[in-house]
Image: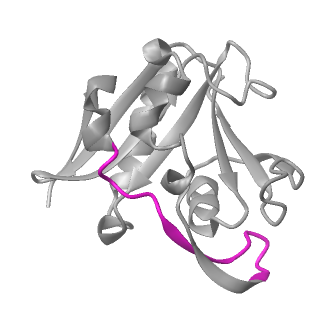
Amino acid sequence: MSLSIVQQSSVDLHAYDSVPIAFTASQRWNGNALSSPFIKDYDAIPGHRPIDWPQRFNLSGWRFAAAFLEDVRVGGATVALQGCEIEEIANWQDAVLWDLRVHPEYRRRGAGRGLLRWAENVALSAKRARLLVETQDINTAACEFYCANGYPCLLIDPLAYPELPNEARIFWAKSFQ
């Protein structure tokens, strides 16, 4: 099957939103098993689905892409060139990979790598010094993915989520300079 990455606009967020982001959390990135595995679905958090972003953010500095295998939408990525919530570590020289999702049935087939390369090209084209990514320690597949693609761990914050005391926030960054 042939993979294509297509840049889109915020008008396409309803289709982007159709790709699920949920995964099973069973262990932490440090290798410790969770006492009770569970399904983590960021889209289930009120106000966090892609269709909710226009009400929360000014998306004028954001870029969107979709991944297709043949004619099937299998993923999406969003890069914030400005106006994102992780400004405590980002500065005007950074881009932020706000969201990267691949449908569970199509994971580990290259769509994630293709979307990540697209995001890196967006950051480079905008002359950003680095691309920042946020994950959680319970998303081991994402942690391993970013490590394997040249993103060193920048910061681990176990207290970042007061409402989720059992999850640590991890920032990754790939520098372009």
Identify whether 131 is placed above or below 43.
Answer: above
Residue 114 placement, left or right of 67:
right
Q: Give the quadrant of residue 107.
A: bottom left
Which residue is nearer to you in this view: 12 or 74? 12
Identify whether 63 is placed above or below 23.
Answer: above
Task: In the displayed orientation, state which residue is furthest to the left.
Answer: 71
Q: Residue at x 30, y 66 (%)?
A: 106
Residue 139 placement, left or right of 98:
right
Residue extent of the magenta highlight: 17-33
The image shows residue 98 at horizontal and vertical percentages of 55, 36
Which residue is nearer to you in this view: 69 or 36? 36
Residue 80 placement, left or right of 77:
right
Q: Within the magenta stretch, is there residue 108?
A: no
Q: Residue at x 37, y 30 (%)?
A: 64
Q: Residue at x 45, y 57 (%)?
A: 21
The image shows residue 85 at horizontal and vertical percentages of 68, 28
Q: Within the magenta stretch, is there residue 23?
A: yes
Q: Give the quadrant of residue 57.
A: top right
Question: The N terminus lies in which quarter of the figure?
Answer: bottom left
Q: Does residue 27 appear anywhere in the picture? A: yes
The image shows residue 96 at horizontal and vertical percentages of 59, 30
The colour scheme of the drawn protein is one colour
Which residue is nearer to you in this view: 49 or 87? 49
The image shows residue 73 at horizontal and vertical percentages of 21, 51
Q: Residue at x 64, y 56 (%)?
A: 147
Question: The C terminus lies in which quarter of the figure?
Answer: top right
Task: In the displayed orientation, state which residue is furthest to the front.
Answer: 46
Identify whether 111 is placed above or below 16.
Answer: below
Q: Give the quadrant of residue 2.
A: bottom left
